[in-house]
Image (cartoon, helix red, strand yellow):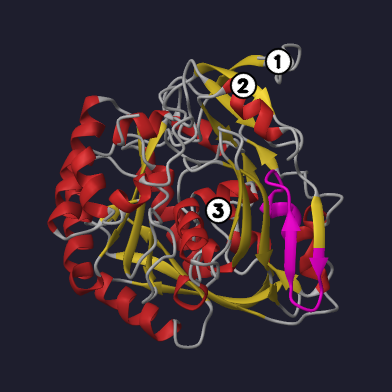
Amino acid sequence: MSSVSSSRVSSSRVSSWGRLSDAEHRVVPITSADAAPGILQASAPGIARGMERSYGDVALNAGGTLWDTRSMNRLLAFDDATGILTVEPGVLLRDIQATFSRQGWMLAVTPGSEIVTVAGAIANDVHGKNHATMGTFADHVVSITLVRTDGEVIVCGPHDEPEGRGWFEATCGGLGLTGLIVQASIRLKRVPGPWLLAEDIPYQSLPEFFELSDASEQSFEHVVSWIDITTGGGRRGILSRANPVPSPHREVPPSATPLGAAKGGITFPVVPPLSLVNSLTLPLLNRAYYRLKRAGAGSKVVHYKPFFYPLDAVEEWNRAYGPRGFYQYQCVLPRATGLESVREILAIVARSGQGSFLGVLKTLGDREPIGMLSFARPGVNLTIDFPNLGRSTLALLASLDAVVSEHGGRLYLAKDARMPVALFEAGYPRLAEFTEYRDPGISSEMSRRLLGS
């Protein structure tokens, strides 16, 4: 352990965003790329720690080591001609957006939270509301510097020779299992500023959603839908669509400036003794939200933060699900049977009496992902959160698994905490290829659950 200062190693209780567990971890800080090889060799096995925004166990290692690179958060270089930004792994998407959006650049792809590290975005190959036009995060990664637990340093990118490209495709969406990312270069997208012309459109049925979504993707970059799953299995919802728009005379909100980027809005204050999301509150919450959005339907210019990251406005909102936490069920289903399979899933959820205020439905573009274990692929993407009620919730999720399996879909590993191995293996056909790139000194609760080590 000579390369790891015992005074800097700490024991800490760590949970993921779903708050399904709270276990002791041995946290080992890594503060520089130069120090990483020695620390990894001395402290393996372990897994990288980011901002703990994955919902399940992809970045958990109960009783074991977490490599914490969050202090490696420097912007290293930016080329204004190409938009290529080089960063350390702990840089937050929030800081990139706040720093560059007023200079005419933004991330090409961003997930539903900006409180995510660049390394985490790569390791989970996140996608956003513009998959049809911009693909996933990995589509805009230029190069990655990876440190293995045997001390080897690998630099790889999408245009390398086959060996280097293999490392790149295994690492993008590779759940942190190929090595520790210590540096990355990503290509930003030119934008007219931090503003969007956004529009909300109510719809009353799933067929109407698909018609609206298909039409919107012809002329809008960002398309997503909230769906009310409490109305007879999801009859209605609000489709939101947006395009970047110049608005130079508008004042940027203080929370969106680099100086104020670390300041959130309100904070959910406590963990209630029972989930506030339950069979009594769900119909009321969904009805109120639908009426509010319907009343405000139409077009308006908005800052990117409320459109891209509405949930980030409430810090620690995951506490609302109570002490037992919650599961997120996020799947992608083939488009050919999308209407049928989504209807089936929503009907099962409706019969169960369980459900979510956070139902999201969108279509994904006709492009296969770069990463061997990347989630987003052509099809229909449905996301539902479920309070953890124990056996009844697990039984419900198993019944949804059956639908996903029957239709040839797959679940999102970044959000998973209990997927059966068979569904994982069926959903990720490049799994055997990926295992050739695994670092034997890296292990997580998810890897042990799904890969056996």
- Asked whether residue 407 appears in the rendered view, the answer is yes
The tag on residue 2 is 1
State the residue at coordinates (44%, 22%): 21
Please tell me whether residue 352 is drawn above or below residue 431 in the rendered image.
above
Residue 286, image x, y percentages:
40, 52
| 2 and 1 marks in contact (CB < 8 Å) | yes
Q: Position of residue 189 (x, y in %)?
A: 67, 74
Name the residue rendered at 70%, 19% in the picture.
Answer: 4
Please give the name of the residue rendered at 29% of the width and 49% of the height, measured from the top-left corner: 432
Q: Earlier in the sequence, mark 2 or mark 1?
A: 1
Say above or below: 176 vs 307: above
Q: Which amino acid does the dot numbered 3 rest on?
A: Ile
> Real-space Cα distance between discs 3 and 1?
30 Å
Report if residue 87 lies within the magenta region. Answer: yes
413 falls in the magenta region:
no
The mark nearer the N terminus, 3 or 1, is 1
Give 200 or 383, whichever is nearer the viewer.
Answer: 383
User: What is the magenta range?
Assistant: 78-97
What label sits on residue 122 in the rendered view?
A: 3
Residue topped by disc 2: 42
Check disc 1 and report its element: helix, strand or loop.
loop
Viewer-proximal residue, 305 or 78? 78
Q: Residues within 10 Å of mark 2 (few under 14, many from 20)?
A: some
Please tell me which of labels 3 and 2 falls first in the chain.
Answer: 2
- Please state if 421 lies on the left or on the right of 9 as rendered: left
